[in-house]
Amino acid sequence: MSHQVDEETPLLRPEEQHKIKTPLPWRQFSIILFLQLAEPVSAQAIAPFAPQLIRDLGVTHGDESRVGYFVGIMYSVFYVAQALTTLQWNRLSDHVGRKPVILTGLFGISVSMFLFGLSKTFGGLILSRVLCGALNGNGGVIRSMMIDVTDSSNMAQALGFLPIPWMTGSTLGPLIGGSLSHPADRFPRLFGQSTFLKTYPYFLACAGPALFTAFMWLVMYMLLQETVPTTTSFWNLIQNKCRTILTIAHTKPPQPDGSNSDTAQGSPDDSQPLPLSALMTPRVLIAISNHATLALLDIALRTLIPVFYSTPVNMGGLGLDPPRIGNILAVFGIANGLFQVFFFARLHDRFGTKVVYTCGVASSVPTIIAFPIINMLSRTYGIDATVWFAVSLQLTMSIALNMCYSCGSMYIAAASPNRASLGATNGVAHTVAACVRIIGPASATSMFSFSMRDPYYAWAVYYFMMMLGLLSIGVSFLLPRRMWTRGN
């Protein structure tokens, strides 16, 4: 095949020009992928038993329609805490390095999971989730680290592997949570005599992810190399900030002259992180808007699925128990991960970033329509092969939605004003995403509870979810078909 470039070549697929791909640094890259396991394992471990846990605590006083409401609050407080802190963690990683920030986040996940398993009140659950969110800014920082070790030639390939830890975590998490909840009842020969596990029936399901995260902390501390070229210690950073404040307070503002015109008008220094105000460019705002609407739609959908599955059939759900819900989510995690690994890079190279992203968010529409159809089938035929086929079809359609995160990461990386500000740009994106995730779980589950109370409003939750899907599709049209490049 000829490599000659003529005048038409850039007009065909500028973001897919053939170039020699840089080999991935597999030793570092595999550790980064391994670190991604912490969040899905810990988050998905509580998903199968969360509705039953709320019932056991008695906060609903037997009102089944309020279970979804409290589950939504429990999920949302995590994102409240994360929204207040994630930007600062990501900006801090641009200065002190990615590694110290990620180590702090892993520590927070481990401790909070132990506390979650020991909680006997709804307030205790809220406290543990707040702690996890406040100390965990890892999502954006790990993605920044992944982009640090890649370039434009191999970024799509690297992001194609990103679902592997999410697939594994989304498989292990529900299996751990669904299988190890109430161990004294499920495994009486092993744990039947344990008074502690009878008193804290969800501790074992939470201790597994907590110990696994502690092991990841050790692996990262010993093996992972820092990816930020120039770092400063946290103490030196504080001293520099204090020195800057004192200098500004005791120095008159410089008079404008022509000597610094290059600084005022020049392009950003690629080696220095930019202030927050300089990050708010149109490109960054477009990328963040898409990331936010995607996060809102995705978290609302992922929160609604286990609540729908656990709700009795006559109240609009499917009536499944936690172990079966865990198995369903585990199988979905495997299928989702395999699809992303084997097909994302190929689809991206064939159709481009924008087409894959827009089709991904559009897949939410049939996924939402499937909810009432599944309930109608279960009312008519019971839980038979027809219902299981409908559930499988629904989850299969939702797989495309997960490709949007990899596409979104590429847009965020391209929108960053310079490479040294990548952590801060990711931090802004994840802060906005955390803000919308505050309302996502609570709004979706509250609408589901509202729909259960009156048959006249039975479809209200699905109209609400459809509105979120259409909003995401609309915002995706703001994205450029050709990927942004710095200086253009």
Image (tube, rainbow, N blue to C red):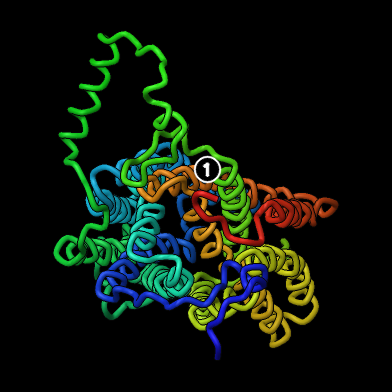
Local secondary structure at mark 1: helix
Q: Is residue 483 left or right of residue 99?
A: right
Residue 4 in picture, x, y percent from top left:
55, 81
Q: Is residue 17 visible?
A: yes
Q: Is residue 417 left or right of residue 347?
A: left
Q: Is residue 112 left or right of residue 173?
A: left
Query: In the figure, residue 285 lies in which quadrant?
Result: top right
Q: Residue at x 25, y 49 (%)?
A: 97
Q: Residue at x 54, y 48 (%)?
A: 437
Q: Which residue is mark 1?
A: 432
Q: Residues within 10 Å of mark 1 (few under 14, many from 20)?
A: many
Residue 224 in picture, x, y percent from top left:
21, 64
Query: In the figure, residue 33 lies in which quadrant?
Result: bottom left
Q: Is residue 60 visible?
A: no
* In this view, 115 is above or below 46: above
- Most extreme residue toward the right, as rendered? 456
Query: In the figure, residue 399 lies in which quadrant?
Result: bottom right
* In this view, 484 is above or below 10: above
Q: Nearer the viewer, residue 393 or 93?
A: 93
Q: Amino acid at mark 1?
A: Val
Task: Tell how many labels.
Answer: 1
Q: Residue at x 73, y 80 (%)?
A: 382
Q: Nearer the viewer, residue 413 or 125?
A: 413
Q: Nearer the viewer, residue 259 or 180?
A: 259
Q: Nearer the viewer, residue 92 or 12?
A: 12
Residue 302 in picture, x, y percent from top left:
57, 61
Residue 98 in picture, x, y percent from top left:
28, 52
Q: Residue at x 51, y 65 (%)?
A: 406
Quadrant (top left/top right/bottom left/bottom right) for the N terminus? bottom right
- Most extreme residue toward the bottom, as rendered? 1
